[in-house]
Amino acid sequence: MRFLSLALAVGLAAVAPAASAGEWEALPPSGRIVVHVQKKGLFSGFAHDHAFEVTEWRASAVIPDGDPASTSVEVILSAGSLHDRQPRLSEGDRRKVDAQASGPGVLDAEHHPRIEFRSQRLELERGSTDGAHLRGTLHGTLALRGRSAPADVDFEAERGADAWSVRGNAHVKQTAFGIKPFSGFGGTVGVKDELVVEIALTLHRAGPRGASAKPRPGAAAREP
């Protein structure tokens, strides 16, 4: 199983002052990042689509009050924390697929443990500038396996009393990062080059230690 990943968020310094009004963050308990890998080939009916959930990540954003178009976002994911949620797999097959995803032929988590996304520009749709409902595309750079490539995240965000609810997706090609999509049995069974990264999370105001503070050892989201 050849595969890849992505996501959305920020982390800054080990010790930081109280967060400003525009700093928000999310950790795994308040959201999900899932990478969808689709099958292809003549005999694809005998194979499975796969959905890899990223279980260790940090997400945060700086959203200036009154100027949402200047929003900046950064993602840090743990390359070894992707787990296939395909319900039809046995536990043994699931462990095998997870190991392949984090192995040297795909994410190479041993040598490149972090996957990072950093935004460069936010393109808002017309009429999406009221500061409470945002829709648009986040243009940025995805880095993994020692390579970087442009990546776009289409999203919708809504601000509540004390949080932002965000949903979005990104389309990423494995070959852009030197990953050869899995193909077997003479090409009759394989996976598509393009992956779909689904994002659904809730951003809360960054805590007193700041969005970049590293989670404590043993916390739900360890430092990727």
Image: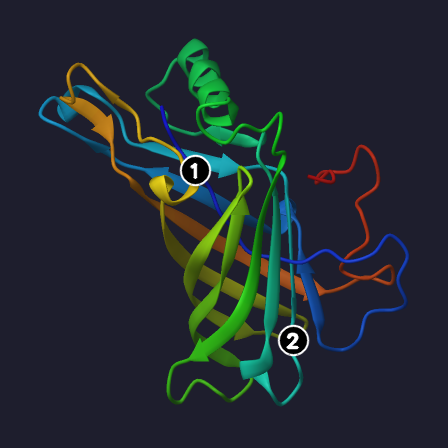
Left or right: 181, with 73 as reference point: left
Q: Secondary structure under badge 1?
A: loop
Lower position in the chain sequence, tag 2 or tag 1: 1
Rendered position, 124 above or below 19: below
Mark nearest the camera among 2 and 1 is: 1
The residue identified by callout 2 is 161
Measured as percent of width and height from the top left, residue 115 is found at: 57, 43
Measured as percent of width and height from the top left, residue 46 is found at: 17, 19
Left or right: 184, with 214 as reference point: left
Label 2 to label 1, Cα distance in Å?
35 Å
Q: Are marks 2 and 1 in contact (CB under 8 Å)?
A: no
The answer to which quarter of the image holds residue 202 is bottom right
Q: Give the residue type that dot 1 points to.
A: Leu
Left or right: 127, with 188 as reference point: right
Q: Residue at x 66, y 85 (%)?
A: 65
Rendered position, 3 above or below 68: above
Q: Quadrant of the C terminus?
A: top right
Measured as percent of width and height from the top left, residue 86 is found at: 37, 27
Q: Give the residue type that dot 2 points to.
A: Ala
The residue identified by callout 1 is 4
Q: Residue furthest top?
A: 92
Q: Residue at x 72, y 70 (%)?
A: 23
